Amino acid sequence: MVDPSVVDPAIVAANAKGIIAIGAGIAVGLCGIGAGMGEQAIGAAAVGAMAEDEKFFGKGLLMTVIPESIAIFGLVVALILLFVF
Amino acid sequence: MLKPTKMTKVVIAGTKDQIEPTISTFHKLNVLHITDFSKETEDFKIGRPLKTASKFSEYLLSLRAISNQLGLKESESGKLTKVELSSDTDEKITKLQKEVSSRFDELRNIESRLKEKEDLLASVKPFFGLPLSMESYAGYETLKVYTGYIDIDLESKLIKIHSNFELFVGEHEKRKIFALFIPKEFEGEVQKLLQEERTYVELKVPQLKGNPPVIVDELTKEITGLKEKYSLIKTELENLKEEYSEFIIATDEHLSIETQKSEAPLKFATSANAFIIDGWVPSDKFDQIEAELQKNTDGKVYLTRIMEEIDEKEIPIELENPVVAKPFELLIDTFATPNYREIDPSLVLFITYPLFYALMLGDVGYGLIVTAIGLVIKQKFKTGGLNALALILLISGVFSTIFGVIYGEFFGFPIFNIEFKGHFEEGILGIFGPTIAGIHLPIHRFESVKPLLLLCFAIGIFHVLLGYIIGFRNEAVKHDLKHAIYAKGSWMMILIGGVLLIAKVMPALMSKSTMPTGDMMFLAGAGLMLIGVILLIKGEGFISILELPTLLSNVLSYSRILAIGLSSAGIALAVNTMAMNLFIRPEGVLLGGGIVLALAGVVILFIGHLINLLLGILGPGIHSLRLQYVEFFTKFYEGGGTKYLPFGHKRKYTEE
C-alpha cells in the first residue's frame, strides 16, 4: 500500500510539468481570444475601407494587426514557461 | 537602386498643327508623365479631343460587342502575333458585326421555336393513353369535352348524373387519364363533381390534327432538325471566332491606342493656335526625347526643362531596382508609393521577406512545391501583379528549400538521422548531418526552441534597427541632422540600451541573484537608454513616452517566426506519425494492417500535407509581410508619392 502522507518526488515533478503546460495553454488561449476580439472590429472597418479604395490595403493591414501583439505576448509567455522554467 | 528614378519637369509647346505628330512621338517613346491641365484661364482652355476620337471609340465599341458575343478572351490567343493593319479595318468590323449579329438573331429564333415545339410535344404525350385522334377532342356544338388525370372510378359517379355520356380511360406514365364527352346541359354538375375530386388534374388539349403517335413523330423530327441547325450555326460562330480572333484582338489594341492618342489633348492646355503640355520625364532620357521630337516635328515643337523650385509632392515616382528585387516593388506599392526623397526599401525586402518566409516554412518538400507553383504562375502570367507575386513566391520557395536542408525536414520527415528526446530516428538519407562552420546540421526545430527564439529576437532587433537607420537618413535628408537625432537617433539609443539592459537583467531575474548594477554593460545600457529617452522627450514631447512599450512589442513580435514554423512542422509531424504508425506500418510492420489500411494512411498523408501546404503558403506569406509593414516600415516609411504613369502603351499584338 502507498502511504498517502509520503509524496513521491517524481509525481511532484510530473504535476509541476503538467501545471506549467496548462499555464502555457491558458496564456496562449486567452491572449488569442483577446487579440481576436480587438481585431474583429478593426478588420471589419479595414475591409470596408478597402472596398471603397484598394489603396487602403497597406494601412488597413497595419491597423488590423495592431492587437496581434497581445497574442504574441501570450505566445512569448508560453514559450518561456515551457522551455525556460 | 534604393532611390526612385531622377525626374525632370518639362514643358512642351508648339502650334496646333503639330499636335498630332507630337502625340505620336510621345506615345511611341512611352516616357512622358503628363500633368493634367485643370486651371482654365481666358487664354488657355483644356484641349479638345482630336476629330478621330469619336470614330475610333465607336469602332472600338462595336468590336468589343462582337468579341463579347463570341466569348473571346484575351488569353486565348496566347501567342503574340503582330498583325498588319490595313485601311479597310472599319469595313471589316461592320461586316463582321453583321455576320455575327445575324447569326445570333437566328440562334435566338431557333431557341424560341425549339421551346415552342418541345412544349407542344410535352402536351401531346399524355394523349398516347387514349385511343382517339387529336381532332376528335374539339369542334362539337352540343357536347362538352373534359380531359385530365383522375384517380377514381369516374363512371360510377357519372351514372348518378345521367347515363348519356361517353368515357375513355387510359394510362400515361402510371397515372390514370380520361376523356369525357357529355351533353352541354350537364356541364354544371360535371364541373362540380370534378372540382370536388382532389385527384383531378385538368389537361389542355393542344390544337393539332392526327393521331398522337404520328404527331409526336413529326414533332420529334422537327426538333431534331432545329437542333441540327442550331449546332450548325454554333459551329459557324466558332469558325468565325477562330478566323477573326487575331484580327479582333489586334484591332482592339490598335483602336485602344488610337483612342488614347486622340483623347490626349484633354490633358493639354490649348489656346486658339497653340498647345502646351506639362509633364515629367526621366532625367537621363531628356536628350533622346528632345532629338526625337525635333526630328518628327521639324523643330516646330519646343521641349523646355523647368529648373525652378518645384513641389516635391508633384514628382512622379518610378522605382528603380535590379531585376531580382523588381517584384518586391509590388509589396511597396501595395503599402504606399514612396515619396521622392525617401529610400525605396525594395532591395531590403528582397532579402528579408524571403528570409522570414523561409525561416517559417523551412521544409525541403514544401519549399520545392512552392517554387514549382511560383514557376507555373510565372509561365502563365508574363506581366503585371501576378507575375511579380509568382516571382516573390519563387524566391521564397528557393529560400525555404535551403532552410529545409538546415532544419533537416522533408514533408516533416527527418532528412538526417536525429536523436530527439533520447529517441533515435532514422532519416531519409540514413546518415548523420554534416557539421558546417561549427553548426551541426540539422537544427531540429523542436529540440532547439530556446536558441531559435533568441535568434528570432536578434533578427528582430537588427531589422528594427535597420528601419531606424533608414529613417535617420530620410529625416536627415528631409530636415537636418538635429531633427534626425531627435526623431530616430533617440529611438536607436533606446533600442540598443534596452537590449544591453535586458541581456543583463533577464538572467539575473531568472536565477534570482542580485542585480548586476556594477557591470559595465548594464551601466552602458542604462545610460544609453536614459540619453535616448531625454532626446526623445526633447524632440517629440512628453507624450512620446507612451510609445516606448511599442518597441518591446515590436521586437517580441518576431517570435512569430518561430511560432509559425513550429506549428507548421508540428502539423507535418502529426500527419506523418498518424499515417505511418497507425496505417502504413502498424506496430513497425510495413503493410501490417493490410492494403486497405495502408491506402487510408496514404490518403491521410496526402490530405494532411495538402492542408499544411496551403497554410504554409498563406501563413508565412502574410506574417512575413506583416513584419515588414508593421515592424519595419513604421520606422521610416512615409509614402504619399504619385506613381509614374507614362503616356503610351506597350504593344502586344500589333506593330507601329
Image (cartoon, coloured by chain):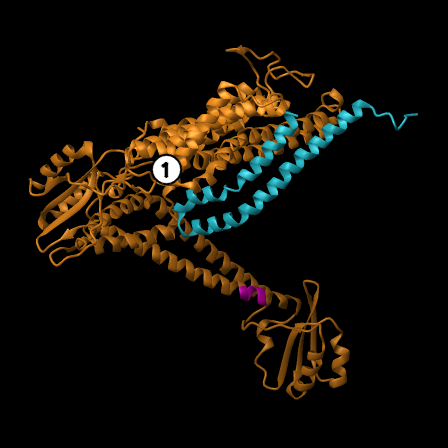
Chain colours: A cyan, B orange
Q: Which residue is mark 1?
A: B539
Quadrant placement of the C terminus of chain B: top left
Q: Main secondary structure of the magenta part?
A: helix
Q: Quadrant of residue A7?
A: top right
In this view, the residue in front, B539 or B416, is: B539
- Of B58 and A10, nearer the camera is A10
User: Whole-percent x and y of residue B161?
Assistant: 74, 85
The percent position of residue B300, horizontal first and vertical second, equals 6, 43
Q: For mark 1, give the secondary structure.
A: helix
What amino acid is found at the position of numbered circle 1 in the picture? Gly
Query: In the rendered image of this protein, does residue B417 appear above or below residue B142?
Result: above
Where does the image place residue B643, in percent across and percent down from the top left? 30, 41
Horizontal side of residue B346 vs B354, given as left or right = left
Q: Which quadrant would residue B567 be assigned to in this image?
A: top right
Q: Residue at x 53, y 50 (%)?
A: A41
Q: Is residue B90 above or below residue B186?
A: above
User: Which residue corresponds to the image point at 26% horizontal and 33% vertical from the top-left?
Assistant: B5
For the residue pair B380 and B246, the one nearer the viewer reads as: B380
Location of the N terminus of chain B (image quadrant): top left
Could one spot residue B451 in this view of the protein? yes
Marked residue chain, label 1? B
Mark 1 Cα within 10 Å, few/some/many (few <14, many 20+)? some
Instruction: Judge left or right: residue B258 versus residue A42.
Output: left
- Magenta stretch? B119-123
- Return the residue nearer the eye: B610 or B482: B482
Q: Residue furthest right?
A: A1
Q: From where the camera sits, is residue B458 visible? A: no
Identify the residue at the far bottom of this view: B185
